[in-house]
Amino acid sequence: MPQSRDSGHQSRYHSYAISIRSYACSIRFSPLRLFLTVLCCGCDILPQKGDTEGEQQQAQWLTSARLVVDTDPRLTIIRLRAEPLDSAHGGHHLLLTRFEFNPTPSLGDEYALSVVLDLGDVHALHRATPYALGSQIPAYATVTCLCRPLKADSVRGTFTMAQRGIAQIFGRIDATLFFTAWDDTSLHASYRLRQRIDGLR
């Protein structure tokens, strides 16, 4: 009888030891799993080789609006703004952003890119899916720089949504912005914008 109790005790101890060992292993490897999870989920928004380094100064996400493009050829100015418009009357989700660049400090080559994405019904967009700018997602841009005045031509590239929450949407933009000189239609310029993009409600 005592031998039977000892066997049961040893069996329970062995099972308990295995449980403790398994738990210890899970604790030991949980940081690795956490890192891999973050890396996998954040692969669309983490910096990548070849990314631009603009500082996003505006990140406005409007859920019911339409884009208005104000053009003043006399002052060579184009303004992008949103006008409230409910969805029942054609209102879209708009992402209004502004990125500031300073490639070489103190050389006067600073510039800013204002970009608006018309996401339409954002609920219809799928995560981790590149959408073509210009065809699937209308996109507009302006550039502010110490250079010859430029007017918007087109935006080509992709927008990929990484996450959409109640108050924030973010993803990546990989685009080339094309412009034409106001005073000479034969002169063209292009700017790259390839990095994380955010929108806040």
Image (cartoon, rainbow, N blue to C red):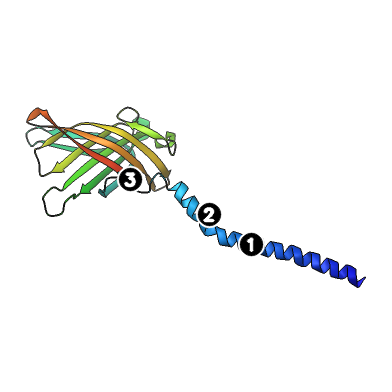
**Residue 85 visible in rendering:** no
Give the residue type that dot 2 points to. Arg
The correct choice, above or below, for 157 with respect to 3 in the image is above
Q: Is residue 23 left or right of residue 42?
A: right
Q: Residue at x 7, y 37 (%)?
A: 75
Label placed on residue 49? 3
Q: Between residues 191 and 121, which one lies in front from this camera angle? A: 191
Per the model, the C-alpha gap separating discs 1 and 2 is 14 Å
Residue at the extreme right of the image, as rendered: 1
Q: Residue at x 39, y 40 (%)?
A: 161
Pointer 3 with pointer 2, Cβ within 8 A: no
- Residue occupied by mark 1: 23
Per the model, the C-alpha gap separating discs 1 and 3 is 39 Å
Give the residue type that dot 3 points to. Lys
Q: Position of residue 59 (x, y in %)?
A: 30, 47
Per the model, the C-alpha gap separating discs 3 and 2 is 24 Å
Q: Between residues 122 and 36, which one lies in front from this camera angle? A: 36
Q: Position of residue 185 (x, y in %)?
A: 10, 27
Q: Position of residue 19 (x, y in %)?
A: 69, 62
Task: Looking at the image, tell me whether mark 1 or mark 3 is earlier in sequence order.
Answer: 1
Give the residue type that dot 1 points to. Tyr
Q: Position of residue 152 (x, y in %)?
A: 18, 33
Label placed on residue 33? 2
Residue at the extreme bottom of the image, as rendered: 2
